[in-house]
Image (spheres, helix red, strand yellow):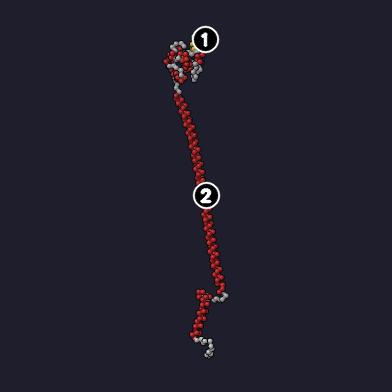
Amino acid sequence: MPLPNIPGYHRLTKTHKYSAAGIAAAGAAAIAFAVVPGGDTGAQTTAQDLPNKPVALTSQKADAQAHHEALVKQSALADKQAKEEAAKKAAAEAAKKKAAAEAAAKKAAEEAAAKKAAEAKAAKERAVKQAASRSAARIETVAAEKKTYPDNLDGWIRESLDIMKEKGIPGSYEGIHRNIIRESGGNPRAINNWDINAQNGVPSKGLLQVIAPTFKAYHVEGTSWDPYDPVANITAACNYAADRYGSMDNVNGPY
């Protein structure tokens, strides 16, 4: 039935009705999309569920942050442990190298000391051998230098002349030989038992017929004390003749 005309009251036409219905439908659709993201029309959302969504997201974000921080700490700890292990390994290697170097140095020092001791020992042994060799050489030289003389008148005179030369006693081979032949005929055991000396109890003896007091007074060191010894008799007689006549060469008769 037609509505009465009331001042301030407007009648709704069909157009107005359709417009209002469209607005209402659009609003309902907006609410539906806001409550169920992704257009899941099968999910039911109530007014009580809406306030809990932000709390759940915040909790998940906090868990993710805590998990991330835990991973960072774990990684840092693992890195620290790896560095410590590397440092320990490097220290062990350095200690091992140092010990090896010290052992090598000690071994080298011991080898050097042993070598030095061996060289010193060898040098000492060489010195001893050289000294022994020199001593043997000196002995051989002395033996070679020491003359040997024949055991006869010629050898006795020559040996006496060498001693006289060493002692500074003058005389010649000819002068000695001449006086020996006259006094004893070359017999070293000759003795005069009839002259004045014999009568006085001191007979002349030997090659050059020397009496005991004269032999003792003019004995030459290094010769025998036996007046019958040929070399001792000649050397003592020549020493006496040098003192009294200047030389045996100056004696031409009894003296």
* Picture residue at 50% right of the left edge, 40% below the top: 113
Which of the two labelled residues, at mark 2 and mark 1, occupies the earlier sequence position? 2
Which x, y percent locates residue 231?
A: 47, 17
Residue nearer the viewer, 67 or 92: 67
* Picture residue at 50% right of the left edge, 74% below the top: 38
Residue 24 seen in this snapshot? yes
* Picture residue at 53% right of the left edge, 64% below the top: 68
Q: Relative to 131, is 92 above or below?
A: below
Which x, y percent locates residue 235?
A: 47, 17
Q: Categorize mark 1 by other alpha carbons within 10 Å: few (<14), some (14-19), many (20+).
A: few
Q: Relative to 146, is 204 above or below?
A: above
Residue 230 seen in this snapshot? no
Instruction: Check the image and name the residue furthest to the front.
Output: 7
Instruction: Check the image and name the residue furthest to the left.
Output: 174
Which x, y percent locates residue 41?
A: 51, 77
Which x, y percent locates residue 146?
A: 45, 23
Q: Which residue is mark 1?
A: 200
Dot label at residue 11 = none
Residue nearer the viewer, 190 or 178: 178
Q: Nearer the viewer, mark 2 or mark 1?
A: 2
- Real-space Cα separation, disc 2 to disc 1, in angstroms: 109 Å
* Picture residue at 54% right of the left edge, 59% below the top: 77
Q: Which residue is mark 2?
A: 95
Q: Relative to 3, is 46 above or below?
A: above
Residue nearer the viewer, 97 or 192: 97
